[in-house]
Amino acid sequence: MQNRLLIKILVPAVIAAGSVVAAVNAAGAETTPDARLAEILDGVLGDPRLEGAQSTVQVRDAATGETVYDHGGDHAGIPASTMKLLTSAAAMDILGPEHRFVTDVRTDGSLRHGVLDGDLYLRGTGDPTMIDADYDDLARQLAEAGVTAVTGDLVADDTWFDSRRLGLEWAWDDEPYQFAAQVSALNLSAFDTDYNTGTVFIEVIPGAEGTTPRVRIDPPSKYVKVSNTAKTVAADGEYDVWIERRHGSNVIDVSGTIPVGAEPAADLASVWEPTGLVAEIFRTAMKKHGITVLGGTRTGRATPENAEVLAARKSMPLSEMLVPFMKYSLNSHGEVLVKTIGRAVSGEGTWDAGLSAIGDYLTAKGLDDGKYVIGDGSGMTRRTYVPTAEILDLLVAVRSEPWFATWEAALPVAGDPDPLVGGTLRSRMRGTPAAGNVHAKTGSMTGVSTLSGYVTDADGRALVFGVQLNHLVTQESVRPIEDMIAVALASYSRTAPPETMLAPSLPEPGPEQPVGLECSWVTPKVC
């Protein structure tokens, strides 16, 4: 298979107007059943916010794969987080819906009278759902096994994956933030159910006027330190708090002002070398359960093959893990899956091995590997280019998979207020025919906005659709344009008189969402 990183793709800046696939007859009198739909979608794409942008849209019949509407769908664009459609489908096929990640504690030493003579190995295989309570449970299992002291070191074994923590061409200024968290085989998530792995939660709580606000870190840790220059100001003062980790360290700078009595400021910060944080959290948990480790902490060393398992934890199955991954668009989960796929297929937990295996899967599903480039599993990199048509090839192909219903259910559902149902679409398309109907993956980065997934039209016809808006120069959100396309598809009837099929009105706006970021990547979430 050719190296996708070397494929040269030429992307035109502007794509011509859309068309319905099926020609008008020679006299020009007869139009296709979807001609009015094409007029509506062409009108939506005439929005001035798209001036100078590359706008590609394609719609197909989900059952037959027949193209219903096409507006430059063969032109490659940056998919942003809709790349997760490809990664998650490959993971379900290669790893299987029942795949579970195992985190265990092992030793090659001997246990006598409560004293473990030797090193203790905490071995991870990438589980992105581990929280501090899970490490506490592993420590409890050790204590129940009779361990009270360890003469050797605590070895945090993250060698299931390679040591490369960040993806190619991820923006350097994104590195301190939770959506660009480092990738490790030993992980810790800051929240119980959000599973933002590789992060800590920072909360800034105002005090009395003129004082330094209090900063809380969760989970508590000495591995992450705070430099706090923020000030509490009068109740009518400016609310302007900045929380940012310094590059190459685990010092969190907190600065700015917060008014007396104001709601605490909060954010998630990524951790530099997250394996070290996991090791500290686990050492603290062992101390809580009466276990003393006499040696130090070491990382980057593999567990001996003959080491005995003393404690273990299995994750939820992949089929369940897809829900937070896809609903919240968790980038770190996508990269964990890439490296896990690489490990499963070739024995190498690397991006190169995983992306190669994903490419082979996509080829087997009918995608043309000469038309796309994939650079990571989450869509964070601008090195990934995929035509909308190729994404739709996958969306049509996976409908025959035995795991399809589970996979489709993991996609965000338009307008559903439950975060674990609606996800990044929970505040969009409410009160329209698309609400509860559209199951689709969102994508956002600076200059890019995307939406691809499934919708049923007013006749009950199942459709797949993809929208990629690239090279955006507007500072306004273009998500309403994507929403109007989805609403138009959900509202459309081939059997209704064409004059009754009106262009969709702008859906009721939900909470203001950040341009260039998924709504789930900010704290608190705005979706």
Image (cartoon, grey):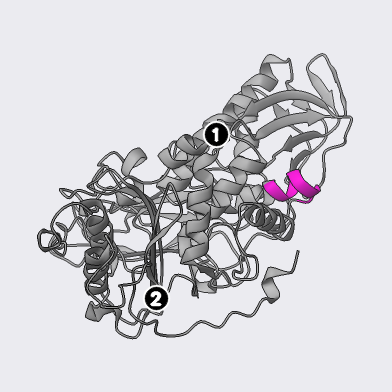
Work out whether residue 371 or residue 134 is closer to the camera in this orientation and state it: 371
Q: Is residue 113 magenta?
A: no
Query: Is residue 256 rendered to the left or right of residue 132?
Result: left
Label 1 amino acid?
Pro
Label 2, secondary structure: give it: loop
Query: Is residue 389 rendered to the left or right of residue 29?
Result: right
Query: Is residue 95 rendered to the left or right of residue 225?
Result: right
Q: Earlier in the sequence, mark 1 or mark 2?
A: 1
Q: Residue at x 62, y 55 (%)?
A: 362
Relative image position of residue 145 (x, y in whole percent): 72, 15
Q: Determine crowd level at label 2: few under 14, some 14-19, many 20+ residues with C-alpha closer than 10 A.
A: some
Label 2 amino acid?
Gly
Work out whether residue 185 or residue 287 is closer to the camera in this orientation and state it: 185
Q: Magenta part of the protein: which range?
A: 341-348
Split into 4 quadrants, where in the image is the N terminus?
bottom right
Query: Height in image: 6 above or below 332?
Result: below
Query: Height in image: 482 above or below 148?
Result: below
Image depth: mark 1 or mark 2 in front: 1
Relative image position of residue 401 (x, y in whole percent): 55, 39
Q: Determine crowd level at label 1: few under 14, some 14-19, many 20+ residues with C-alpha closer than 10 A.
A: few
Q: Quickly name the residue at label 2.
A: 447
Label 1, secondary structure: give it: loop
Q: Residue at x 47, y 35 (%)?
A: 406
- Give the number of the disc on residue 402: 1
Relative image position of residue 62 (x, y in whole percent): 42, 49
Count of numbered labels shown in the rendering: 2
What predominant SS class does the magenta segment belong to? Answer: helix
Query: Height in image: 359 above or below 344?
Result: below
Q: Residue at x 36, y 39 (%)?
A: 420
CA–CA distance in space, label 1 to label 2 = 36 Å
